[in-house]
Image (spheres, helix red, strand yellow):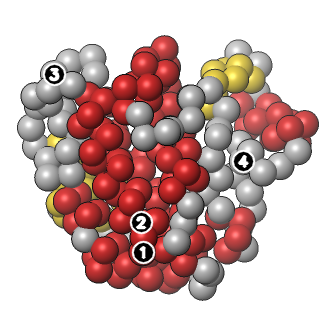
């Protein structure tokens, strides 16, 4: 396990983003940084959001351990302690620090990284059967994060993403829910995937 406090260390983040090129191919640093943050942000917010129904776990970087593979992929995360204060400021500190470090190392747009964080929060709360908490949680964080949004596809609730992971910039297809496609194309792809 790796301490999430390393997300405040520009040298460590730079090395991880550089190694992402082995997974995603060579691309500009801002693209690799955005893709890397897309995979990390969901894992980083998971321990706290999954614990909202019980004792809430601390999202502070020094409390979170990341399960990181040798090739740089994130398998999961855990928090070592319960939250001892309000959730919003704790998340603001951890997400704000990680976003600032990644933006400084890669020149990725901090607002785009923030949108990814919003979508990660919205997804994790959807998976935890608590999507109604997303707006409250994101608003409590601040940081200029966009409002989380959901859309019903058939009978399935899904996140209406505000963010793009840029995976298509490294030769992969756009995600099914990618906001950088025509709305009718995204809706058709979501219907095909979700029924």
Q: Say the numbered circle drawn on residue 55.
A: 3
Query: Is 23 placed left or right of 82 in the picture?
Result: right
Query: In the rendered structure, which disc, 3 or 2, sits on the residue that comes first in sequence?
Result: 3
Vertical side of 26 occupied by 59: above or below: above
Query: In the rendered structure, which disc, 1 or 3, sits on the residue that comes first in sequence?
Result: 3
Q: Which residue is mark 2?
A: 102
Q: Residue at x 56, y 35 (%)?
A: 146
Q: CA distance from mark 1 to mark 2?
A: 5 Å
Q: Which residue is mark 4?
A: 178
Picture coordinates of residue 52 (x, y %)? 28, 22
Q: Say the numbered circle drawn on residue 51.
A: none
Q: Residue at x 54, y 66 (%)?
A: 108
Nearer the viewer's eye, disc 4 or disc 2?
2
Q: CA distance from mark 4 to mark 1?
A: 25 Å
Q: Residue at x 18, y 32 (%)?
A: 57
Hey, which quadrant is residue 143 in on the image? top left
Secondary-structure class at tag 4:
loop
């Amino acid at each position: 396990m790796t301490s999430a406090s390393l997300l405040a260390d520009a040298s460590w983040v730079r090395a991880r983003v550089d190694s992402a090129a082995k997974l995603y191919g060579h691309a500009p640093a801002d693209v690799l940084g955005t893709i890397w943050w897309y995979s990390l942000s969901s894992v980083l917010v998971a321990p706290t959001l999954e614990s909202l129904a019980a004792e809430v776990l601390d999202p502070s970087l020094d409390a979170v351990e990341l399960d990181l593979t040798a090739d740089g992929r994130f398998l999961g995360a855990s928090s070592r302690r319960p939250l001892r204060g309000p959730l919003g400021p704790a998340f603001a500190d951890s997400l704000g620090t990680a976003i600032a470090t990644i933006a400084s190392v890669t020149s990725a747009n901090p607002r785009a990284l923030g949108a990814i964080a919003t979508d990660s929060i919205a997804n994790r709360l959807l998976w935890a059967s608590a999507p109604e908490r997303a707006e409250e949680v994101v608003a409590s964080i601040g940081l200029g994060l966009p409002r989380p949004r959901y859309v019903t596809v058939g009978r399935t609730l899904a996140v209406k993403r505000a963010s793009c992971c840029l995976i298509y910039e490294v030769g992969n297809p756009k995600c099914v829910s990618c906001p950088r496609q025509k709305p009718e194309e995204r809706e058709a792809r979501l219907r095909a995937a979700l029924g």
